Structures are given as structure tokens and as C-alpha cells.
Amino acid sequence: MQKLWMRYSELLDKDLNAKIFDNFKNMVLCALLFAAGTNALQSDHKIFMSITATNLAGWGVITVSGLLMLLNLSDGIRRLAQLRYHLAFQLLIVLVYIIISARVVEMVWSFRA
């Protein structure tokens, strides 16, 4: 138990907390951008002083948020893959990370109204 606690303390010294919260913050920001893009697709308002159609802007924001989400997800998976554990445990952690990421997007998407 003490060995596990020492490992945990070592990870905290290497800014584990900041990395986790930064990753989560980026995930929530991508979800908010995605929700804003889908909201623009559903509204009939003209934006940018009617220079650009709302649909085009909505798809643009959705594309940017999707690319940022993939970048954030791949960074999280790469960091998890560097852990020195069994491959099955790493795959389980990656699966849980993907499920949590998708769920955060769904939750923010439901709050867009």
C-alpha cells in the first residue's frame, strides 16, 4: 500500500492533477464549440452581418471542434499509452477515456438549449 501511495505522490509531483484538468477543460471547450455549431445549424439567424450563411458557419465550428476533440483525445490516449501496465489494462483505460469524452460531449450538447 505504501508503494502505491509513493507512486501516487510521485505522479502528483509531476503535475498529474494539472494535466488531467487541462485535458478535461479542453474536452468541455470542444463540446461547447460543438454545441454552438449545432445550434447555429438549427437557427435561422444570419451571422457576420449576413456575409456568411448560418449553415456554413455552423459546419465550420463543428469541423473545428471535431478536429480539436480528436487532437485532445489522441493526446490523452498517447499519454495513457506511456503508462507501464499490461496492454489489457491500457486498452481498458483508453476505452473508459473515450466513453467519458463522448459522454461529456453529450451532456454539454443537451445543455445547449
Image (cartoon, helix red, strand yellow):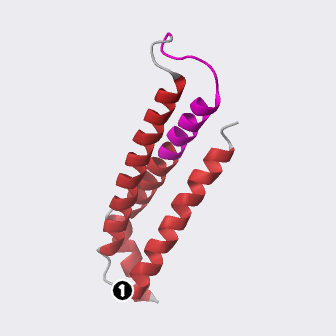
Q: How crowded is mark 1: few (under 14 residues within 10 Å), some or many (20 or more)?
A: few
Along the line of sight, the residue nearer the viewer: 26 or 35: 35
Q: Is residue 50 above or below residue 57?
A: above
Split into 4 quadrants, where in the image is the C terminus?
top right
Magenta run includes residue 6? no
The single residue placed furthest to the right in the displayed view is 113
Residue 87's x, y, as percent? 36, 86
Residue 39's x, y, as percent? 61, 34
Mark 1: which secondary structure? Answer: helix
Magenta run includes residue 38? yes
Residue at horizontal 32 percent and vertical 74 percent from the top: 81
Q: Is residue 59 above or below residue 10?
A: above
Residue at horizontal 35 percent and vertical 61 percent from the top: 74
- Do we see residue 99 in this rendering? yes
Residue 109's x, y, as percent? 62, 45
Residue 42 relative to residue 102: left or right: right
Residue 10 relative to residue 35: left or right: left
> What type is the residue that disc 1 sits on?
Leu
Residue at horizontal 58 percent and vertical 40 percent from the top: 35
Q: What stretch is highlighted in magenta?
A: 30-49
Residue 111's x, y, as percent? 68, 42
Along the line of sight, the residue nearer the viewer: 77 or 21: 77
Q: Name the residue under label 1.
A: 87
Along the line of sight, the residue nearer the viewer: 15 or 48: 48
